[in-house]
Amino acid sequence: MYAIKTFDEEHRVLATGNEPELHRLVLSKYQHGEWRFPVVIEEEAAKPWDDAAYLASMRPDPQTEEREQIRAIRRAYHDDCHTIRSLAIKTGFTNQQVSHLVHKYSLRLRNQYWRAEKYNDPDDVITGQTIYILGDKLDAPADSIKQASQSNGLVCGYYISRVPRA
């Protein structure tokens, strides 16, 4: 492989290719008056292979990787995953990663839980992070639990309430 370089202090490369092509190019450019300065055709030295630089270029950029992770977390958040556990399950990241990214990017999570208290035994309490988990524990549909929480009604003998966490 050959290169046409300017014959000045910059040594800019004007073109690369095989020798016959470059001779034709130099002659045509000279005849048309495009290259009035002296040029030289030199054989390009093969660049030594650098394994470390190649491997470094293959490594993913940590910032790009983090941006992809927060995009995945935001997609899961918009798919109604509002707890760290559900976000971790949906995205496949660890709870610690999700917690770190949620804190770093100020994603608001739902820090509340659902509570069912037996009407004649206040020590019998069942809790769940979501209305569906509580419904599974009580063997009751989620709609009836939601309705009971709004009207102070009973579901399967339990008072239902939503408790905000501090």
Image (spheres, rainbow, N blue to C red):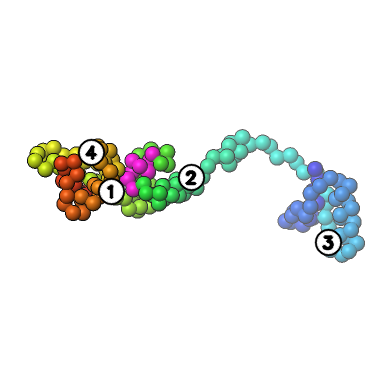
- Badge 4 local density, few (<14 within 10 Å), some, or many (20+)? some
Q: CA distance from mark 2 to mark 4?
A: 41 Å
Measuring 58% from the left and 37% from the top, which residue is drawn there?
55
User: Horizontal and vertical percent for residue 57?
Assistant: 58, 41
Tag in front: 3 or 1: 1
Disc 1 and disc 2 in contact, CB within 8 angstroms: no
- Residue holding disc 3: 35
Label 1 sits on what residue type? Answer: Asp
Judged by its main secondary structure, the magenta piece is: helix
Measuring 20% from the left and 51% from the top, which residue is drawn there?
149
- Residue holding disc 2: 65
Specify the segment rendered in magenta.
82-89
Q: CA distance from mark 4 to mark 1?
A: 13 Å
Numbered mark located on residue 138 in the image:
4
Disc 2 and disc 4 in contact, CB within 8 angstroms: no
- Residue holding disc 1: 143
Tag in front: 1 or 2: 1
